Image (spheres, rainbow, N blue to C red):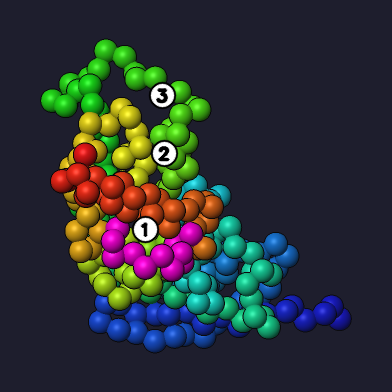
Amino acid sequence: MGEATAMLRVKVWRGNAEGGAMADYAVPARANQTVLDVVTHIQREVDPTLAYRFACRVGMCGSCAMVVNGRPRWTCRTHVSRVAQDGALELRPLSNLPVIRDLATDMAPFFDKWAKARGTFQPKDAPDGSVPDDFAVVPPATKQRQQADAGIECIGCGVCYSGCDIVAWNPDYLGPAALNRAWTLVNDVRDGARKDRLAAVAGDAGCHACHSTQSCTAHCPKGIDPSGAIAGLKRSLFWPGFKGGVR
């Protein structure tokens, strides 16, 4: 007789916006198994009513993010062997966001804050919305280009937002992803909305609300430093304050 298949003990949060509880599942342990593989097995083989999100499965979309053993992660790029504790996993929906059902959260508040932080590009050469005749050239060696490039790879997965202590304490706080996006545009010399954008992130719910706990930087799957971006926004607002306003 062959050896018995090793099993993972998996606790999954089941419920909706009104409440829920943890449910227990047993999932066969496999070589090179990801946490998303575990969730997919439960949904396909054990309980088809389990709700969760995924799309690309290769770390490009970020839609599969969940809280795994207390830490927000991309589940498609997280191997069980790295995070399982004595063969056990605990899976919850992303923190700081409304739950739709089970492991699926409502991302609307997250992206609404991008809008409040003026996270859309406004061409300096086409303020009326027209199309410029040509693309502006931004030399790669400039400080502004390097600062903008440092945060431009954010894909809006919500991992940093879920792991942010300040969002948990202050639900109005714009959050690290929205402020990181604002910082990339503040440093984009092609953008014409710098003054309005800095004004948008200067309020009580903006960059000054950050306590620099750096949870966002520690959790970011892309290796981006939102905490550094927020510090940059604070500096950009600090010095002009002595001169009578934001420039």
Q: In the displayed structure, does residue 150 sit left or right of residue 113?
A: right
Cα distance, mark 2 to mark 1? 15 Å
Query: Start and end of the magenta stretch?
Result: 207-217
Which residue is drawn at the image coordinates 41% and 65% (left, top)? 212
Q: Residue at x 52, y 85 (%)?
A: 24
Q: Earlier in the sequence, mark 2 or mark 1?
A: 2
The amino acid type found where label 2 is placed reads Ala
Q: Is residue 211 above or below residue 199?
A: below
Label 3 vs 1, first from the N-terminus: 3
The label shown at residue 138 is: 3
- For badge 3, the amino acid type reads Val
Tell me the SS state at disc 3: loop
* Mark carried by residue 176: 1
Q: Secondary structure at mark 2?
A: helix
Are there few (<14), some (14-19), or many (20+) residues within 10 Å of tag 3?
few
* Mark 2, other Cα within 10 Å: few <14 / some 14–19 / many ≥20: many
Label 3 vs label 1: CA separation? 26 Å
Numbered label attached to residue 215: none
**Of all residues shown, which one is farthest toward the top?**
133
Give the quadrant of the N terminus.
bottom right
Residue at the disc numbered 2: 148
Above or below: residue 143 compared with residue 204? above
Instruction: State how far apart marks 2 and 3 are (Cα).
Output: 11 Å
* Residue drawn at the location 46% of the way across and 64% of the way down: 214
- Residue 200 location (% of width, % of height): 19, 50
Q: Position of residue 184 (x, y in %)?
A: 37, 41
Q: How many marks?
A: 3
Taking 239 as reference, is 13 left or right? right
Residue 145 percent across, percent down from the top left: 43, 32
